[in-house]
Every structure is written in structure tokens, then in C-alpha cells.
Amino acid sequence: MEEKKLQANGLYIIHDKYFDDFPSPRHMKNKNESRPYFLAVKGDNGIIWMVPLSSQVDKYREKEKERHKNVLCYIGKFKGRYSAFLTGNIIPVTNEYVQRPFTVKGVPFVLRDKKEIREIESRVRRYLALVRAEKLVPAVDILSIEKELLNRVRNS
């Protein structure tokens, strides 16, 4: 099987198999591999951190106002509309769990705004640092999932 080439800052849909392999009642619902869309942020160790998007912007707007302290979400533009990038709900994946890219008119969608990319990546890095330092407890045990995925990569 050919290895999928993921683009950093591309949007993807995750296989339902991921949520079967790493079950948690706290995962966002995958809606039969149709939503949510996930923004790919490449990690340093071969893991891809997927940031779910939500169209429920008003729900997250108050959290996002704490711009310098907030690592849980970022309100940004997606296809000309505002969306909430839920950096506090990231999940680690490997290529095998990526169903397909999100496309617009058959072309894979990639976030291009450098300022937004920097802000989202910064929040992901800060969130992970706080989780690794045990200063934040994620809803889903992302560090255990990351460890399992890294073991699989090493043993394949």
C-alpha cells in the first residue's frame, strides 16, 4: 500500500478505526468519517497532531479572548468563515488513520494564512508542553496514545 503524503496545515478526515483503536467517551464524534475536519500539525517525532475544527464559534469565543494565556482554542478563518480550531482537543495520529484530505473542488484544502498557522502551531506546542509537564490534564489521554503510536512505528 502506498504511503499517504500529508501536507502540514492541510485538513483531513480521520478513519473511524482510530476511534475504535483508541476509545474514549471524551473524543469528538467522528460522524461516520464525515466531520469534524482536522488540521494537521506535524510533530517532531513523526506523530501528526490533528486539531479538530468546530463551526460553533460563539461557544468558544469567550475562551479565545484570553489570547495570550489561551491554549485551548483559536478562532480563525476557514473557507471565508470563522471556525474554532480546538487546540485543546488535539489527537495524535499516524498516516494509517487518515481517511482522506478535505477537498474544495477536488483540490486538497491547505490553510495558507501564515499568521494563523503560526498562532495555531504555537498553541498546540504550548498545550502539549503543559500536558507533558502535568499542568493540564487533557480530556483524552493523548500521551498514552502518542506512546502507543510511536511503539508501532518503531516496531513496523
Image (tube, rainbow, N blue to C red):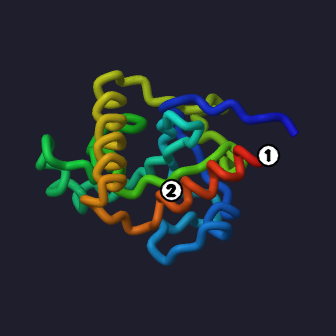
- Comparing 57 with 15, the one in front is 15
**Mark 1, mark 2: which one is toward the viewer?**
1
Q: Which residue is mark 1?
A: 156
Report which quarter residue 5 is drawn in.
Answer: top right
**Callout count:** 2
Q: Is residue 136 above or below residue 38?
A: below
In terms of sequence position, does the residue under pointer 1 or pointer 2 come before the other? 2
Q: Position of residue 102 (x, y in %)?
A: 59, 41
Asked if residue 92 lies left or right of residue 69, the reply is right
Residue at point 29%, 43% (across, down):
126
Which residue in the rendered view is the most extreme toward the right? 1
Residue at point 63%, 33% (across, down):
6
Can you tell which mark lies on residue 36? 2
User: Disc 2 residue type?
Assistant: Pro
Q: CA distance from mark 1 to mark 2?
A: 29 Å
Q: Is residue 47 above or below residue 105?
A: below
- Comparing 36 with 146, the one in front is 146
Crowding at label 2, few (<14), some or many (≥20) Cα neighbours within 10 Å?
many
- Comparing 116 with 25, the one in front is 25
**Residue 42 is at least partly visible in this image:** no
Q: Position of residue 151 (x, y in %)?
A: 67, 52
Residue at point 70%, 45% (across, down):
153
User: Disc 1 residue type?
Assistant: Ser
Q: Are marks 1 and 2 in contact (CB under 8 Å)?
A: no
